[in-house]
Amino acid sequence: IAVDAGADRIEFSECLEVGGVTPSSDLLREAIHHSRRAESSGHAHGLLVTSLPVTAIPVIALIRCRPGDFYFNQAELRQMIDEIERAIETGCAGVAVGASLPGDDLNWAFMETVAKLHAARSGFELVLHRVFDKVPEPMLAIPRLIRLGYRRILTSGGAEHAIQSIEQLRQWQEAFGERIEILPAGGIGSSNAARILESTGCKQLHGSLRGISQRGARRLPDPDEIRKVQDAISAAGQSAPGMS
């Protein structure tokens, strides 16, 4: 659904009801297979061209060995390093990672270990997930992440929803947006996408963009919602949305 509706990147995980955990290799492999779509369509001499160019939408694997807090012990950190290596072998375009220490500063030893895995792989993307929302000194953490080679920070700006942290997101985008991607997340939808883009200057948005059933339960991605958010990004002169 996400691919057909026009999402240009997918963050993939299992168990969204607990905030997501690392997907199995088999499930990740299947997601990569389904991430392919035709680049364009056309006609030749009045006949439909059926052999269309196909590209794979980048699939970023969430790396989180369990639900709950981000204070991982050494065995869990080693497990996540193994999960990163399996994600690389499976063919994903990058990983979304993160770990904290007491006090909520990033576990820099882990972040550096992950960066070393990335260094030898051209084009592989390192993303810091929403563990960043609790970092006590983000203006000091961001330059360090840039030096380590992290490509993107997935963040609500510290509040539960991005719309509540517009000023913080704007400051990070203005200070660092040319060197690392600031990706607003949390409560993103068609009702607030344009405002967040305009107010922060950020160039992309992240959201599950799922529909709501008549009983109020969250369900599958809503293609209309995806298209509306993409339209908001296009209208702002930006890129297409990330999609998880």
Image (spheres, grey):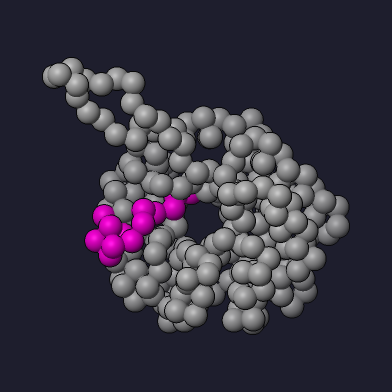
- Determine if residue 66 is in view: no
Q: Is residue 200 above or below residue 184?
A: below
Please name whichever residue, 216 or 106, is drawn nearer the observer in this view of the structure: 106
- Quadrant for residue 27, please give it: top right
- Determine if residue 243 is in view: yes
Please identify the quadrant where the N terminus is shown: top left
Horizontal and vertical percent position of residue 48: 21, 20
- Quadrant for residue 98, please give it: bottom right
Please name whichever residue, 55 or 158, is drawn nearer the observer in this view of the structure: 55
- Residue 76 in the figure: left or right of residue 212: right
For image coordinates 33% across by 26% down, the residue present is 52
For image coordinates 39% across by 39% down, the residue present is 3
- Residue 130 in the figure: left or right of residue 89: left
For image coordinates 69% across by 52% down, the residue present is 118
Q: Is residue 194 above or below residue 19?
A: below
* Span colored in magenta: 231-244
For image coordinates 46% across by 41% down, the residue present is 57
Horizontal and vertical percent position of residue 145: 64, 69
Horizontal and vertical percent position of residue 4: 35, 37
